[in-house]
Image: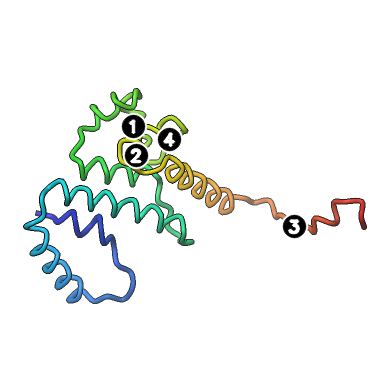
Amino acid sequence: MKNIYFDHVLGNQKDGTTDKDRRLTKNILDAYIKDIPKEELTENQRIGIKLQMKSYLEHDTKETIVAGEFLNKLIGIFQIKKTKFAEYLDIENANLHALLKGRRKFNSKIATVVGEIFSIKPELWLYIEAKNELKIFNLNSKQKRKKIDVYELTNNR
């Protein structure tokens, strides 16, 4: 069985850690989590996803992670049926799947409801969407934007 604690809390390590180090860390975690109550383990995983979201916002990476990917991880951690979750959000099942894949964006309503469910501020979901929009704009922008000094726009020069 795949250890979701290791995957969701530690994420993918990209710091030069060897496979041997990862296996050792995984074995230590596996031994430790056997005695953790399910509710505590789930809460730790939720916090891990929240930390991954914050880390994504704070670091410039080439990789784009849609907000829906984080939501999909949370749905998996809590073992929520997607059809039931879509009903709770008052959206169609197809729209939930589009949200999870990044084909639809979080709006204020969805960010608020999801934020309340998982105790993750709605702003965090919306900041991820905004970061991704800016990334896409900057990558796809064919228009060369010239640097301009704000004082060139005023009559003060």
Amino acid type assigned to the residue bearing label 2 in the image: Leu
In this figure, which residue is indicated by the disc labeled 3? 146
In this figure, which residue is indicated by the disc labeled 4? 104
Residue contact between numbered discs 1 and 2, judged by CB atoms under 8 Å:
yes
Amino acid type assigned to the residue bearing label 4 in the image: Arg
Task: Give the mark nearer the N terminus: 1 vs 4.
Answer: 1
The Cα–Cα distance between marks 1 and 3, rounded to whole angstroms, is 40 Å
Q: Where residue 140 appears, x then y in whole percent? A: 57, 50
In this figure, which residue is indicated by the disc labeled 1? 96
Task: Give the mark nearer the N terminus: 2 vs 3.
Answer: 2
Which label number is shown at residue 100? Answer: 2
Task: Give the mark nearer the N terminus: 4 vs 3.
Answer: 4
Q: Where residue 68 appears, x then y in whole percent? A: 36, 42
Element type at marker 1?
Answer: helix
Q: Residue at x 33, y 46 (%)?
A: 70
Q: Is residue 140 left or right of residue 113?
A: right
Element type at marker 3?
Answer: loop
The Cα–Cα distance between marks 4 and 2, rounded to whole angstroms, is 8 Å
Amino acid type assigned to the residue bearing label 1 in the image: Leu
- Mark 1: few/some/many CA within 10 Å (<14, 14-19, 20+): many
